[in-house]
Image: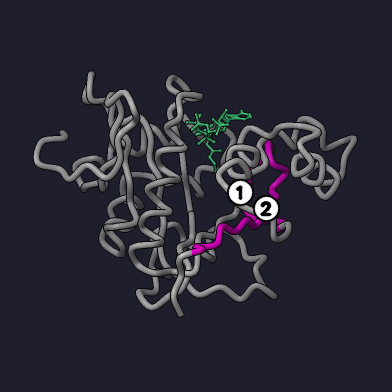
Amino acid sequence: MLQGRKVLATREDGRYVVVQARPEDAPALEAVQRACFPDLSESELATARHFLSQQQHFPEGQLAVFDTQTGELVGSSSDFQMNVDFAHYAHPFMEETGDNLFTTHDPRGEWLYGADIGIHPRVRGQGLAKLLYGTRHDLVRRLNLRGHVAGAMPKGYGAVAERLSIEQYVGEVIREERADPVLTVQLKRGYGVWGIIPDYLEDESVRNYGVFIIWRNREYRA
Ligand SMILES: CC(C)(COP(=O)(O)OP(=O)(O)OC[C@H]1O[C@@H](n2cnc3c(N)ncnc32)[C@H](O)[C@@H]1OP(=O)(O)O)[C@@H](O)C(=O)NCCC(=O)NCCS
């Protein structure tokens, strides 16, 4: 699966590599997606068909992580370019992503939009998301974009939603009074929180909320 592919990033010990995803990866990408988003509505899950469309619209933004020992695809991230109106950022996931097909990709867009990141549960906590975020930031710099934005899924919120408002919860995560399995990972990579998106997608674990996050490219040249 890896032969002849350009390696974009490698974990220090050489075991895991990031490459651009290809059409033949689509079934494995769907399998990782299903393992990563067990609570997400079926209509919002990315299937092989979606991954193929995403690769057609913006091949450079579609990344896959491979285990060099087993040859398995164990993670991925999906991005496209767009312009962002920061006064009106609260759009549903399916609207932003063109129903997850990336028909909304704008080659002149000044921001990279992070639609998705997933690492198979079997290999979490080993720096693979870190590897993907680094590669996404390399792409932002290479294309001289203003930065990376995303609708983060605060996966720990559902468990405390009866006691805390989403604003209180996100505030506590920002102040490091509690950790969230997704938002904390992103804050550690240098993202800041811009605002909350109600009805971002259908997922009980986040009570349908998204958190709009932003990472600025310090090397951006106007
Ligand atoms: C979020 C996710 C991609 C993280 O992947 P991962 O490979 O386990 O993350 P990493 O091992 O690269 O961890 C990066 C950093 O976050 C920290 N981290 C990872 N998981 C964490 C957790 N559950 N709670 C707190 N911190 C965590 C790590 O300690 C590491 O910190 P460091 O920079 O100080 O070393 C993974 O958990 C996942 O696929 N989740 C399900 C899908 C999902 O919700 N995607 C996000 C949609 S917005």
Please tell me which residue is depicted at 63% across the width and 47% down the height of the picture: 202
- Kind of element beneath mark 2: strand
Helix, strand or loop at mark 1: strand
Q: Is 44 colored magenta in this rendering?
A: no
Q: Residue at x 81, y 33 (%)?
A: 177
Neighbour tally class for label 1: few under 14, some 14-19, many 20 plus, Cα within 10 Å: many
**Which of the two residues, 180 or 206, is positioned nearer the viewer here?**
180
**Nearer to us in this view, 190 or 202:** 190
Looking at the picture, which amino acid does disc 1 mark? Ala
Whether the residue carrying mark 2 lies under 8 Å from ligand 1 is answered with: no
Identify the residue under disc 2. Answer: 211
> Residue 204 or 186: which is nearer the viewer?
186
Amino acid carrying label 2: it is Val
Residue 211's spot in the image, x, y percent?
67, 52
What number is the disc on residue 14?
none
The answer to whether marks 1 and 2 mark residues whose Cβ atoms lie closer than 8 Å is: yes
Mark 1 C-beta closer than 8 Å to ligand 1:
yes
- Say whether residue 54 is left or right of residue 93: left
Across and down, in percent, residue 155 comes to 66, 36
Q: Which mark is residue 152?
A: 1
Q: Which residues are magenta?
A: 197-218
Q: How many marks?
A: 2
Residue 5 is drawn in which quadrant?
top left
Q: Residues within 10 Å of mark 2 (few under 14, many from 20)?
A: many
**Per the image, is 215 magenta?**
yes
Q: In the rendered view of the protein, which quadrant contains the N terminus? A: top left
Residue 207 pos. (x, y %): 73, 43
Specify whether 210 is left or right of 145.
right
**Mark 1 vs mark 2: which is more N-terminal?**
1
Ligand 1 lies in which image quarter?
top right
Q: Position of residue 145 (x, y in %)?
A: 43, 69
Is residue 19 depicted above or below 124 in this figure?
A: below
